[in-house]
């Protein structure tokens, strides 16, 4: 369920080598406070996150991806 404070953020990731990378990234982002939904697309290297920006910023999400061992940057599409 999304609320008015929910932001939909799309990131472009680098360094994916296997489908298990997806689970590592989803797990790290999912730990963040305010994250409602995480979808990592292996084929396109997209990470889509629904989150409460007052609790979790885009920088927090990028840092969580880095903690999983990958690079990510905000993307317009």
Image (spheres, helix red, strand yellow):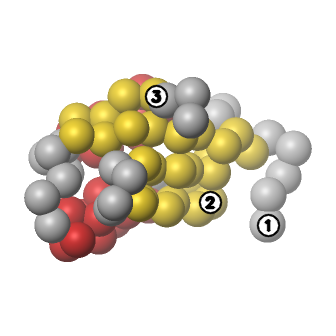
Count residues near mark 1 (Cα–Cα under 10 Å), then give few for <14, some for 14-19, many for 20+.
Answer: few
Q: Position of residue 42 (x, y in %)?
A: 33, 61
Of callouts 1 and 3, the N-terminal one = 1
Residue at the spot 53% in from the left edge and 50% down from the top edge: 48
Q: Position of residue 54 (x, y in %)?
A: 66, 33
Query: In the rendered view, does 74 fall on the left or right side of 54?
Result: left
Q: Label 2: state its secondary structure.
A: strand
Which residue is label 1 attached to? 1
Instruction: Answer above or below: position of 67 versus 29.
Output: above
- Distance CA(mark 2)–CA(mark 1): 8 Å
Mark 3 highlights which residue? 74
Question: Which quadrant is home to the N terminus?
Answer: bottom right
* Mark with earlier residue (3, 2): 2
Asked whether the viewer can see residue 69, the reply is yes
Q: Whole-percent x and y of residue 57?
A: 53, 31
The residue at 79%/58% (across/down) is 2
């Amino acid at each position: 369920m999304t609320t008015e404070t929910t932001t939909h953020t799309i990131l472009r990731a680098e360094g994916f080598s296997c489908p298990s990378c997806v689970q590592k990234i989803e797990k790290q982002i999912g730990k963040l406070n305010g994250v409602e939904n995480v979808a990592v697309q292996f084929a396109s290297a997209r990470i889509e996150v629904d989150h409460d920006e007052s609790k979790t910023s885009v920088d927090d999400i990028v840092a969580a991806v880095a903690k999983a061992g990958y690079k990510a940057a905000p993307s317009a599409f």
